[in-house]
Image (tube, grey):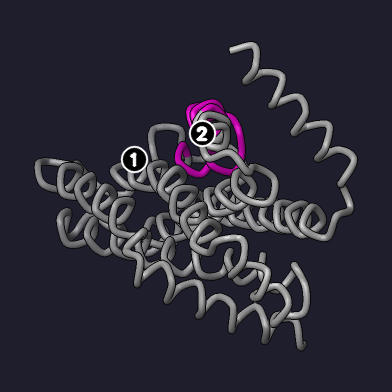
């Protein structure tokens, strides 16, 4: 499909922009540092240590996706929207670029865990670890895409809203897909949707998030957006 080819081209463009601006460095270093601490001591047998690394990939994924979404200024984004043929390829391309980075970080976590706890990983545990990291990372990418332009023009408001959302949803072990994905690797194995179910739900969440952002970019929610902006302005003026 033409829009998918455009989305792939946009993903490569935005990925190069993020790499050139080094916006990926902070989340990547944070995650690598956490993995060094997690697997540097006595992490215990797999897959339990992966519960922590998968859960942290949720906010790291959101951070990375937000960096991708904000890598262009308004002028450059307008040019990209025009060249790509509309908002959908641009939004999907940004999501793909962020997800590629998240998948790489998740793979590093899984491989690091296997090496650090050599001999404790089973085939089923390895598959569960991979799927859980993808579920958490993809959901984080969806969150980071939403809490950025065009829904949030203010970086400060986006940061506070995203942090609140991430903390509430990431610390609820019963809440799919992130909470249940991490819990399925820890002491609560056997419950929830299962690793594959969490990944499917994460993909559905991502589709809904991308549809929302593309719709806002197309002006489908212009009236709602104006009311939201007015409400934020009133809140700032009172503060």
Nearer the N terminus, badge 2 or badge 1?
1
- Residue 208 versus residue 9: which sits nearer the camera? 9
Compared to residue 170, the image places residue 109 above or below, namely below
Q: Determine the residue located farthest toward the left in the rendered image.
A: 41
Element at label 2 = helix
Magenta range is: 164-183
Compared to residue 77, the image places residue 217 above or below, namely above
Of the numbered discs in the image, which one, if any, rests on residue 163? Answer: none
Compared to residue 221, the image places residue 89 above or below, namely below
Residue at 76% x, 60% y: name it: 214
- Residue 25 versus residue 233: which sits nearer the camera? 233
Mark 1 Cα shell of 10 Å, populated few (<14), some (14-19), many (≥20): some
x then y, percent, for residue 205: 69, 50
Residue at 28% x, 43% y: name it: 49
Report the mark closest to the observer, 2 or 1. 2
> Is residue 147 something one can see in this rendering?
yes
Residue at 45% x, 41% y: name it: 182
Residue placed under numbered mark 1 in the picture: 52
Q: Do the residues labelled 2 and 1 touch (CB within 8 Å)?
A: no
> Is residue 169 something one can see in this rendering?
no
Query: Is residue 156 located in the magenta-colored stretch of the structure?
Result: no
x then y, percent, for residue 189: 46, 39
Query: Is residue 177 located in the magenta-colored stretch of the structure?
Result: yes
Residue 127 falls in image quadrant: bottom left
Element at label 1 = helix
Residue placed under numbered mark 2 in the picture: 156
Residue at 89% x, 53% y: name it: 220
x then y, percent, for residue 151: 69, 45
x then y, percent, for residue 68: 50, 61
Chief SS of the magenta region: helix
């Amino acid at each position: 499909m033409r829009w998918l080819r455009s989305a792939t081209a946009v993903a490569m463009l935005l990925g190069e922009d993020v790499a050139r601006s080094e916006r990926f460095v902070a989340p990547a270093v944070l995650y690598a540092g956490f993995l060094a601490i997690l697997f540097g001591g006595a992490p215990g047998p797999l897959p339990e240590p992966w519960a922590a690394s998968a859960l942290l990939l949720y906010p790291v994924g959101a951070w990375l996706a937000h960096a991708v979404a904000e890598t262009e200024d308004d002028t450059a984004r307008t040019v990209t929207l025009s060249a790509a043929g509309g908002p959908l390829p641009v939004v999907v391309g940004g999501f793909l670029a962020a997800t590629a980075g998240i998948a790489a970080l998740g793979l590093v976590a899984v491989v690091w865990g296997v090496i650090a706890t050599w001999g404790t990983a089973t085939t089923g545990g390895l598959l569960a670890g991979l799927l859980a990291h993808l579920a958490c990372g993809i959901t984080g990418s969806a969150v980071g895409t939403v809490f950025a332009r065009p829904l949030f023009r203010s970086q400060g408001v986006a940061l506070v809203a995203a942090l609140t959302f991430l903390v509430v949803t990431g610390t609820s072990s019963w809440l799919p897909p992130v909470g249940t994905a991490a819990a399925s690797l820890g002491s609560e194995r056997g419950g929830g949707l299962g690793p594959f179910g969490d990944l499917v739900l994460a993909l559905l969440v991502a589709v809904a998030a991308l549809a929302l952002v593309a719709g806002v970019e197309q002006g489908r929610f212009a009236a709602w957006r104006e009311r939201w902006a007015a409400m934020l302005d009133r809140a700032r003026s009172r503060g």
